[in-house]
Image: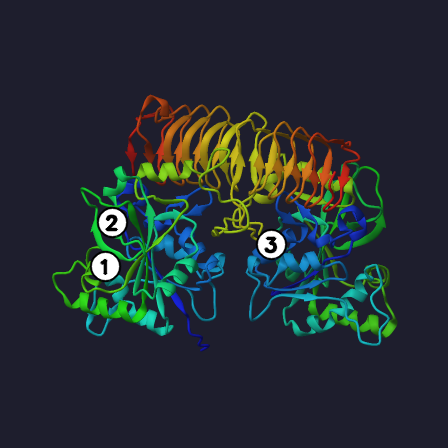
C-alpha cells in the first residue's frame, strides 16, 4: 500500500503561545538542533513516504526558512517531494482569520493536492508530537485490516504527561476496532491517548471531503468520526516506542529535559536506519575551553563553553561565558551569555543576550521564558 | 543541456595515496582523511572554491576512491549540485586507444583536458587535496588577471630553516618568478609553493600536450610543467598568501593541525559565518555530556557521548568515552569507543576503533614520546598496552 503524507503545521499553536508567537508549532525548536516538524518529516521519509503536503495557516516564515527546498530530507524531488499548502484565499475573500481553521476545513483547502496524489492512503500528522515511529508498520496494519481510518495510540500515564486542555482518548476492542472516541482532560491513570497521527484511505478521505462540502461539516471529529463510530471501519494501532507530546510550556520543558535520560535519547535518536534529519547549519564542532565544566547536558555543535553547564540543553551557536553557571535550562540557537551570569530553569528563545552578571531563575513547574531576540 | 561558459574551473588532485599517513590512508585516499572533528581534508579546498565563486570542480581520483566518491556524492553539502558544472569525480578511464592510470599530476589533468574545454573556461585552477587552509581563490584570480600572467603560483612565507622541504620560488620585486627549485638544499628565498596554480587554459593545454609527448617527463607540475614554462620565458607570478596554511601529509603535521583548532585564540578558527567550511552531515544526535564527565580545551562534535575525562583533544562524530576513561592530547576521528578505565594519550585514533577496558595507548606528551596511531576498525583488547609511536593497522 502506498502512502502520501499530510502535515498540519499550525494546529495546536495555542498550546505554547510563548514559543509560537513568532513561529508555527511545526518550527518550534526542540532537542538542541531540531524543529518539531523534523520528527514527523523524518518518520515519513524513513518509512518510504516521499510525497508530503505541509498545511500551514499563519506565521510560517520560519517554517519556510527551515524547510527550504526540502533537500535536507531528500524531499527536493521532481516527482513527489514536499509541497507547502498555505491557506487558499481568493481575491474576493475577507482574508485569513487569526486562528487555524478546523481540521476538516484545512483539509478542504488541500483538496487539490489530495486529488492529485494517487497513493492508496494518507498519513495525517500534527507537529506537537515527538517520536521515532515506523509508519510502514502502521500502513501495513491499515492495509491488513482494510480500515477507513487507523488511529495511532499510545498508552500513557495521564498524571505525568502535562496534557493540554483537551486530548483525544480512544477506546478499542481486542481486535483494534475503535469503540469510543472522547475529547477530555484526564487527570490520572493510564489512558489510551490518540497521538495525532492517523492513516486515512484515499477513497474514504475524498468521500469525507465531498460530503463535508455538501453537508456543511466543519469538524472532522464531531461531524464525521463521532457519527460514524460503529459504522465505518476505524482501527487503533498501539505504538509502544518513546513518545513525547508538547501540550504546554511546562510540558515542553519536561520533554526537553527528558533528553538527558538515556532511554529517551535512544528511543528517539538511537534507532537503527531511522535517523532524525534536520536542516544542516554547518556549524563548527563545539568548543570546550579551559575552565569549562559541563555535566549531564545535551549540546549541539557550534557552541563555545567557558563556564559551568549542568542539566541543560544547548542549541547551536550558544555562548556560555566565563564564570557563568547555567543549570536546568534550555538555551536556544545563538543565545549569548556574558560572564558571571547565573541561569536556573530558564528557557531562552533564539538570539537572546544575557549581559554580564545577570541572575535569572524560574522553577521546573514554571520555567522563566525569555523571548526571541531579547537582551537582559 | 544548459550551457553557460565558466570563467574558471578548478581541478582538485585527489588521487594520491598519502603514504606518509600510513595506517590512516590504508583504506581511504588522503583527501578523505577526517579532520577537525566533523570535516575531511577535502572540505577545505571544496569550501574555498564555493566561497570564492567557483562552481565547477573536477576531482581527480585514483587511489582508494570509494569513501571519497561517496563523501562527495552529488556535491550537495558544498552547494556543488548544479544543473551545469558542480562537482564531478574524474577517475582514469579507457579510451579508443586504451587507457592509463594517472602517471603524475600533469598527466591527470592532461587526461581530462576535454572536461576543462567543455566549460570553455579561460582559467584553470589546480588544487591539491592535502592542505588545511581558508583562501579566497578569487583574489588570486584577480591578481593573475591584473598581472596578465600565464601562470600564477600561490606562495606562503615559511621559516628559512623549513624552506628546504618545499618548492621555493625566487621572485623579482614585481612578483614575477625567475627561479623555481624543488626542495633546495640552500634556499635563496622563503616563498614556498602551496601547490595552488592558476593557468590560462590555452597555455596549460599547450604545455600539457608537449609534456605528454616527452617520454622522459615524469608528468608532474612541480618537476616538469612549471620548470618548462619558466625556461620558455612565460609570464609567471607568485601570489603571496597570508593566513593559516598547513600541509597535513604526515602524522605529526596532521596532529598539529588538529591542535591548532584548540586554545583561547586558535590559529585555525572555523567558527563564524564569513568563510564557512562545509562538510557532509552525519545526521547523528547532538552530543551528550554525562554527569561525571570532565572536558577541557576540546573540540567535540555531534553524536558523541562523553562520560569520562577528555583534555586537549579533537573528537569526531559518534565517539563514546566511557566513565573513568582518560583521553588527553588526542585526535579521535569518529565512531570509536574508549572503554572504562582506558587511557589514551598523545595519539591519533582512526574511525570505528574500540579501546578495551583498562587499555593504555600512547604515553603523556610531556615525556617526549611519539604519537601512537591506531588505524581504522581495530579493537584493542582490554588491559592491552600500545606503545607510543606505534602504528597499528588491520
The residue labelled by disc 1 is: B226
Within 10 Å of disc 2 (Cα), the crowding (few <14, some 14-19, many 20+) is many
- Expressed as whole percent of the image width and height from the top left, the position of residue A107 reads 76, 66
Task: Give the distance between the C-alpha atoms of the residues marked 1 and 2, in whole angstroms.
Answer: 11 Å
Q: Which mark is residue B167?
A: 2
Asked if A10 appears above or below B97 in the picture, the reply is: above
Residues flagged by tags 3 and 2 on a common chain = no
Quadrant in the picture for residue A160: top right
Mark 1 touches mark 2? (CB < 8 Å): yes
* Mark closer to the observer (3, 2): 2
Secondary structure category for the residue under label 2: strand
| Quarter of the figure with the N terminus of chain B | bottom left
Q: Is residue A194 visible?
A: yes
- Please tell me if label 1 and label 2 are on a single chain: yes
Which of the two discs, 1 and 2, labels the residue nearer the N terminus? 2
Please give the label number shown on residue B310.
Answer: none
* Residue A141, placed above or below residue A324: below
Whether A295 is drawn above or below A108: the answer is above
Amino acid at each position: 500500500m502506498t502512502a502520501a503524507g499530510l502535515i498540519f503545521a499550525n494546529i495546536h499553536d495555542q498550546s505554547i503561545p510563548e514559543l509560537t508567537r513568532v513561529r508555527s508549532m511545526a518550527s518550534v525548536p526542540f532537542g538542541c538542533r531540531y524543529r518539531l516538524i523534523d520528527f514527523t518529516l523524518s518518520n515519513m521519509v524513513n518509512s518510504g513516504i516521499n510525497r508530503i503536503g505541509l498545511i500551514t495557516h499563519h506565521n510560517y516564515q520560519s517554517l519556510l526558512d527551515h524547510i527550504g527546498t526540502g533537500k535536507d530530507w531528500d524531499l527536493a524531488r521532481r516527482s513527489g517531494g514536499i509541497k507547502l499548502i498555505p491557506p487558499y484565499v481568493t481575491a474576493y475573500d475577507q482574508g485569513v482569520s487569526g486562528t487555524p481553521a478546523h481540521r476538516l476545513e484545512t483539509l478542504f483547502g488541500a483538496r487539490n493536492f489530495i486529488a492529485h496524489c494517487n497513493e492508496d492512503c494518507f498519513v495525517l500528522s500534527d507537529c506537537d508530537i515527538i517520536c521515532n515511529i515506523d509508519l510502514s508498520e502502521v500502513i501495513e496494519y491499515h492495509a491488513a485490516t482494510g480500515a477507513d481510518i487507523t488511529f495511532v495510540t499510545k498508552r500513557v500515564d495521564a498524571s505525568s504527561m502535562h496534557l493540554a486542555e483537551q486530548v483525544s482518548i480512544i477506546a478499542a476492542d481486542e481486535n483494534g476496532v475503535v469503540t469510543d472516541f472522547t475529547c477530555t482532560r484526564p487527570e490520572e491513570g493510564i489512558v489510551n491517548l490518540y497521538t495525532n497521527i492517523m492513516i486515512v484511505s484515499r477513497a474514504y478521505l475524498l468521500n469525507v471531503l465531498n460530503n463535508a462540502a455538501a453537508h456543511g461539516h466543519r469538524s472532522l471529529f464531531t461531524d464525521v468520526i463521532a457519527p460514524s463510530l460503529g459504522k465505518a471501519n476505524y482501527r487503533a494501532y498501539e505504538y509502544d516506542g518513546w513518545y513525547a507530546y508538547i501540550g504546554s510550556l511546562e510540558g515542553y520543558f519536561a520533554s526537553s529535559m527528558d533528553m538527558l535520560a538515556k532511554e529517551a535519547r535512544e528511543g528517539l535518536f538511537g534507532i537503527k536506519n531511522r535517523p532524525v534529519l534536520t536542516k544542516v547549519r554547518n556549524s563548527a564542532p563545539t568548543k570546550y575551553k579551559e575552565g569549562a565544566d559541563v555535566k549531564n547536558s545535551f549540546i549541539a555543535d557550534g557552541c563555545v563553553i567557558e563556564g559551568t553547564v549542568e542539566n541543560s540543553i544547548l542549541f547551536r551557536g550558544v555562548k556560555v561565558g566565563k564564570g557563568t553557571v547555567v543549570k536546568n535550562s534550555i538555551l536556544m540557537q545563538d543565545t549569548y551569555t556574558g560572564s558571571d551570569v547565573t541561569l536556573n530553569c530558564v528557557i531562552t528563545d533564539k538570539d537572546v543576550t544575557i549581559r554580564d552578571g545577570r541572575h535569572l531563575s524560574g522553577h521546573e513547574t514554571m520555567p522563566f521564558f525569555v523571548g526571541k531576540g531579547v537582551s537582559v | 543541456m544548459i550551457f553557460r561558459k565558466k570563467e574558471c574551473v578548478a581541478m582538485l588532485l585527489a588521487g594520491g595515496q598519502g603514504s606518509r599517513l600510513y595506517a590512516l590512508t590504508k583504506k581511504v585516499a588522503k583527501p578523505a582523511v577526517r579532520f577537525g572533528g566533523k570535516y575531511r581534508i577535502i572540505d577545505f579546498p571544496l569550501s574555498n572554491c564555493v566561497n570564492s565563486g567557483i562552481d565547477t570542480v573536477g576531482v581527480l581520483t585514483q587511489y582508494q576512491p570509494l569513501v571519497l566518491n561517496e563523501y562527495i556524492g552529488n556535491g550537495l553539502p558544498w552547494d556543488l549540485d548544479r544543473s551545469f558544472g558542480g562537482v564531478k569525480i574524474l577517475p582514469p578511464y579507457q579510451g579508443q586507444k586504451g587507457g592509463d592510470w594517472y602517471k603524475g599530476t600533469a598527466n591527470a589533468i592532461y587526461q581530462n583536458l576535454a572536461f576543462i574545454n567543455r566549460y570553455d573556461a579561460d582559467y584553470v585552477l589546480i588544487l591539491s587535496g592535502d592542505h588545511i587552509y581558508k583562501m579566497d581563490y578569487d583574489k588570486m584570480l584577480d591578481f593573475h588577471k591584473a598581472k596578465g600572467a600565464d601562470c600564477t603560483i600561490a606562495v606562503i612565507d615559511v621559516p628559512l630553516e623549513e624552506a628546504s622541504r618545499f618548492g621555493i620560488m625566487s621572485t623579482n620585486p614585481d612578483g614575477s618568478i625567475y627561479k623555481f627549485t624543488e626542495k633546495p638544499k640552500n634556499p635563496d628565498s622563503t616563498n614556498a609553493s602551496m601547490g595552488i596554480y592558476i593557468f590560462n587554459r590555452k597555455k596549460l593545454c599547450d604545455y600539457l600536450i608537449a609534456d605528454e609527448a616527452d617520454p622522459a617527463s615524469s608528468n608532474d607540475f612541480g618537476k616538469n610543467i612549471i620548470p618548462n614554462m619558466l625556461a620558455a620565458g612565460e609570464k609567471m607570478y607568485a601570489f603571496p598568501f597570508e593566513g593559516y596554511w598547513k600541509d597535513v601529509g604526515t602524522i605529526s603535521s596532521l596532529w598539529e593541525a588538529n591542535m591548532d583548532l584548540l586554545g583561547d585564540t586558535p590559529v585555525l578558527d572555523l567558527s563564524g559565518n564569513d568563510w564557512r567550511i562545509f562538510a557532509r552531515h552525519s545526521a547523528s544526535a547532538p552530543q551528550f555530556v554525562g554527569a561525571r564527565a570532565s572536558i577541557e580545551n576540546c573540540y567535540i562534535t555531534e553524536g558523541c557521548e562523553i562520560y569520562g575525562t577528555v583534555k586537549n583533544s579533537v573528537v569526531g562524530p559518534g565517539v563514546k568515552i566511557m566513565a573513568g576513561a582518560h583521553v588527553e592530547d588526542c585526535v579521535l576521528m569518529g565512531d570509536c569507543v574508549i572503554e572504562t578505565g582506558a587511557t589514551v594519550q598523545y595519539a591519533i585514533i582512526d574511525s570505528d576503533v574500540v579501546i578495551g577496558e583498562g587499555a593504555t595507548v600512547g604515553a603523556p606528551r610531556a615525556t617526549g614520546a611519539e604519537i601512537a596511531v591506531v588505524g581504522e576498525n581495530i579493537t584493542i583488547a582490554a588491559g592491552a598496552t600500545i606503545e607510543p609511536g606505534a602504528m597499528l593497522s588491520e
